[in-house]
Amino acid sequence: QVQLVESGGGLVQPGGSLRLSCVASGLPFTFREYAMNWYRQAPGKERELVATDTSTDITVYASSVKGRFTISRDNAKDTVYLQMNSLKPEDTAVYYCNALHSSFGIKYWGKGTLATVSS
């Protein structure tokens, strides 16, 4: 059974930081073969792609988070991280981890972790 389990969300003041983690288990094929993505969905808004770490270690960020967020992965631990700095109230959302194996069109989602930025 495939599981992606996010953690690290919480309440933080504007300007603060959070580090999200996503641990994968049960994936068909090795973790390093997957592009790992972080999405977020704010109340009343559509889910949006925040950051991508491809299977070839290329990283891509949404313009709204570039320079503030950093995605990284530890293939030995089947884990992807999202370091979020200089947080703003508009970063408040449920953050979802996603694993994509583009060669086979396989996609998996975690259940999300809530990050709230508020004073």
Image (cartoon, grey):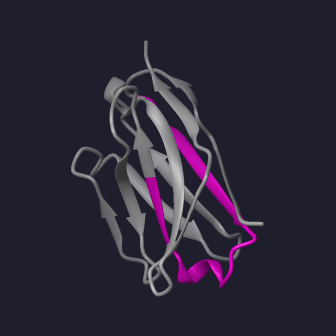
Note whether 63 is above or below 86 in the view shown: below
Q: Give the residue at the far front of this rendering.
A: 105
| As drawn, 21 above or below 103 | above
Q: Position of residue 19 (x, y in %)?
A: 55, 45
Closer to the camera in the image, 117 or 112: 112
Q: Does 2 lie within the magenta span?
A: no
Task: Name the residue located 62 percent from the left edge and 40 percent from the top edge.
Answer: 8
Is residue 36 magenta-colored?
A: yes
Q: Residue at x 50, y 64 (%)?
A: 72
Spot the residue most to the left: 63
Foreground residue among 111 and 56: 111
Give the x, y percent position of residue 104.
Answer: 50, 85
Residue at position x 52%, y 38% in the image? 18
- 8 lies above or below 59: above
**Quarter-of-image position of residue 70:** bottom left
Task: Count how many numbered circles sit on residues in the image.
Answer: 0
Residue at image position (58%, 35%) is 9
Instruction: Name the image quarter holding the C terminus.
Output: top left
Which image quarter is the N terminus in?
bottom right
User: Residue 27, position in %: x, y?
Assistant: 69, 74
- Left or right: residue 37 compared with residue 10: left
The boundaries of the magenta stretch are 16-38
Q: Locate residue 29: give its quadrant.
A: bottom right
Q: In the shown orientation, is residue 71 left or right of residue 106?
A: left
Above or below, 35 against 23 in this view is: below
Classify residue 28 as left or right of residue 93.
right
Q: Position of residue 97 (x, y in %)?
A: 54, 54
From the viewer's side, name the closer residue of 60 and 47: 47
